[in-house]
Image (spheres, grey):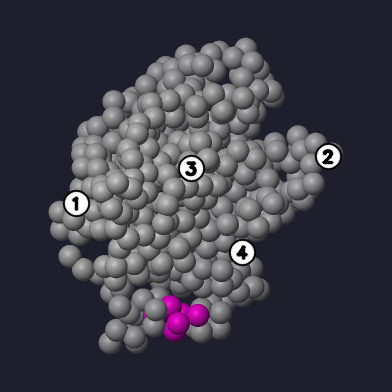
Amino acid sequence: MTGKLFGTTGVRKVYGTEFDIEMALRLGKALGTYLKEGTVLMARDARTTGLMIESALAAGLMSTGVNVVRAGMVPTPTLAFGTKFHGLTAGVMITASHNPPEYTGVKFWQGDSMGFSPEREREIEAIYNSGEFKTAPWDSLGTESQIDTLVEDHISEILSRCDADTIRSREFRVVVDPGNGAASVLTPYLLRRLGCDVISLNSQPDGTFPGRPSEPDESTLGDLVNTVRATGADLGVAHDGDSDRVVFVTGKGEIIRGDRTIALLAREMLRLQSSGDDRDGTIVTTVDSSRVLDEAVANAGGRTIRTPVGDIQVAIKVRETNALLGGEACGVFIFPEFHLAPEPFLAVCRVLETMARSGESFDSLISTIPVYPLRKTKLSCPNEHKAAVMKRLTEMVPSEMEGVSDVITVDGVGVVLSDGWVLIRPSGTEPVIRITCEASTDKAVESIVAAAARLVERAIRETVG
Ligand code: MG
């Protein structure tokens, strides 16, 4: 089992063939050697491999003299929050996010709740590969303890940051689908504390994900949509396996793209921003979000900044620009006044608050944020050729697409056209090049995505041969 350990964010591998307990033990030693001292908070999502991988990592950490505090099975944001809340050195989450059940993985968090940057991950990988680990003698090994209150700590802090009484006064009916993931231990209970009539689907944590695939999207949320409609609920809420993402469903059963929800919450935050707040109304999002978000934010007096894809990239830019809010279209929301990790649970509260304050349904609120046609496609490209193909595309796309008014090089290559935009970037996890395109009409989006796909095909043909 060799090869690069860290991917786009943390380690994410198939258990047994790509990652095992020996590697987890070694990774624990590498992290401990990197940290030198201190106390690490550890938790896991609901996967069948979680406890075992966590235990191997804990053993590696303790062998270097670093202490561990184990929080059990909690959502990723709860681990990140807890690391900051309890003033610990770092956080380690055993999770493979929304990947299929045979995957396992590890994600690292700093004491300030920011995920480890790719640079820090590279330093740990270098120690891992060198095999030169700190070893503590028998009388100064790291200690192990447990914390059982992390979910309660998190819920209390969330409730103190939202207008709970206004939400309670409306007695909303909410259907929650954590997809048998880690949010099973948090979201239903948070909503009950907000006076909601809670209907739960797939809410027993189960690492085989019996209810639905872990990624919350149009193809996996049919049961949630049907239950929202059948029960006359006000809102549907779905999470991925480790619960750092949330996707909302309206009372009519429409699944809402994350960038539209970010636009709605950003508009509300800009409207409510107090005059003493020194932040300039910046909203941070990734290059693949809809232009609808820029329009909504600009109309409300704010501005948007784009980053490469990935919640760490958003968090870094949120901190750098002292932003109000950060988010990704896949369902990531970052509220920097709370912490710098994705915070889906406060996002649920903010949506309910907006509904409660306005007296309007989520359907009616979200209908004020338009939808532009969006298409995504991907073309196979061997990993070893991706860099050369992307280099070729960086030259071809701006010169060969029609009507280019701006070139975007934040992540991959993108161009703004007279009636839309297209973004071409290599996948960080699969041997594919991804194309994302948005335009004002269905006809325009089809024609732009086809033109871009032809260019990618040609670049692959000319590079791979
Ligand atoms: Mg996730």
Upstream in sequence: badge 3 or badge 4: 3
Span shown in magenta: 389-394
| Beta carbon of the mark 2 residue lies under 8 A of ligand 1 | no
**Type of amino acid under label 3:** Leu
Identify which residue is drawn at 33% across, 48% down.
Answer: 140
Identify which residue is drawn at 56% across, 69% down.
Answer: 410
Q: Is residue 439 left or right of residue 141?
A: right
Badge 3: residue crowd in 10 Å (few <14, some 14–19, many ≥20): some
Secondary structure beneath disc 3?
loop
Vertical placement of residue 253 versus 119, above or below = above
Q: Is residue 193 left or right of residue 378?
A: right
Q: Quickly name the residue at label 4.
A: 419
Upstream in sequence: badge 3 or badge 1: 1
In the foreground, 44 or 88:
88
| Picture disc at residue 276 | 2
Q: Can residue 22 be seen in this view?
A: yes
Q: Where is residue 28 in the image (x, y as percent from the top left)?
A: 30, 53
In the foreground, 184 or 433:
184
Identify which residue is drawn at 39% across, 30% down.
Answer: 147
